[in-house]
Amino acid sequence: MEQKKRIVIIANPFSGNKIGKDIDQALKTYLDSEIYDYEIQYTEYPSHAIEIARHAADHGYYAVIAAGGDGTLNEVVNGVSGKPIIIGIIPAGSGNGFAHHLGIRHNIEKAISVINKGNTMQIDIGKLNDRYFINLGGVGLDAKVAYKTQKNKSRGFLPYFLQTLSEIVNFKSSFMVIETPEKTWSGAYVTAVIANGSIYGYDFTIAPASILHDGQFDVLLFKKAPLWKYLINLPKLLRKKIHTSELVEYFKTSKITITPRDKVFYHVDGEGFETDCSIEFSIMPNHITIFTPV
């Protein structure tokens, strides 16, 4: 009889959908017990998922499953980066942008069925200085929204939407020098989006042409412009065509360095920071393996 594969489910009890109440019963009901021998570990503090994931990778586990939101997934990626272990996703956060990119929705049964089927794919991840990210990085408006939202104890779409609206109305562009191996830009930009995946939280598609295994980021530079010009481009945003707007410089690259004139906000996978130093994003081709629906 074939030995069962050991997996660990890392569950964030504080995630947007409070999955901690349901995950144990769902795994007992839906996970194929003939294939997998599982254990659940709940995160108790920031970066705990990194520690759990790293321990699993170093002790021969077959897979580590992130049961939470984008933050939990980011920590798992940072814990196992470059190690021979598979990452799975049970989306349970407020946004779950990367899970949506893969076609894994807010349905525990369907997410577990992806793990049962066992289809895998090697994908790229991004690196910002010494931090890895799987979905999106950015500098400017989106990063400030992330920074402010994470300080808000309220979770869900409404606080995120209200914070975004507030920042859009009041945000000032930043002067940046943006360097890639192919070209250099300089000027005032509202935000620079560095996309490995394609979707922010809440199914908000920003980089529809993004491919997870092409060895490149999709980059969108949003130029300084009056608010009304962005408002008349909303239809393109809703049709997932914002990268074709005249307000956006869109290109692909494997490495990008952004040097701000003054202090700016930046983020990786929705975790926001501030800096006045250069920020370097680089792609790590085929760096991790994930369970995928197909």
Image: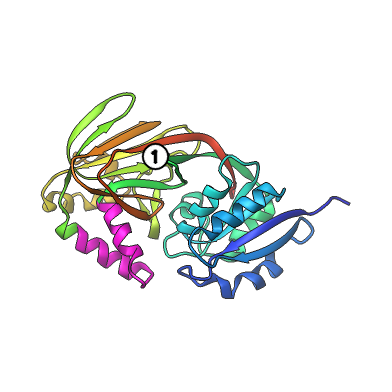
- Residue that lies at the very extreme toward the right in this rendered image: 1
Q: Position of residue 12 (x, y in %)?
A: 53, 66
Q: Position of residue 237 (x, y in %)?
A: 27, 50
Which residue lies at the image location 26% right of the left edge and 67% below the top edge? 162
Which residue lies at the image location 49% right of the left edge and 70% below the top edge? 14
- Count the numbered circles shown: 1
Could you tell me what secondary structure mostly forms the magenta stretch?
Answer: helix
Q: Is residue 37 visible?
A: yes
- Whether the magenta-drawn stretch holds residue 163 is answered as yes
- Whether the magenta-drawn stretch holds residue 150 is answered as yes
Query: Mark 1: few, some, or many residues within 10 Å (few <14, many ≥20)?
Result: some
Horizontally, is 2 left or right of 181 in the view?
A: right
Which residue lies at the image location 38% right of the left edge and 55% below the top edge? 271
- Residue 160 lies in quadrant: bottom left
Name the residue that disc number 1 marks. 209
Q: Position of residue 183 (x, y in %)?
A: 27, 25
Give whichever of 75, 254 is nearer the camera: 75
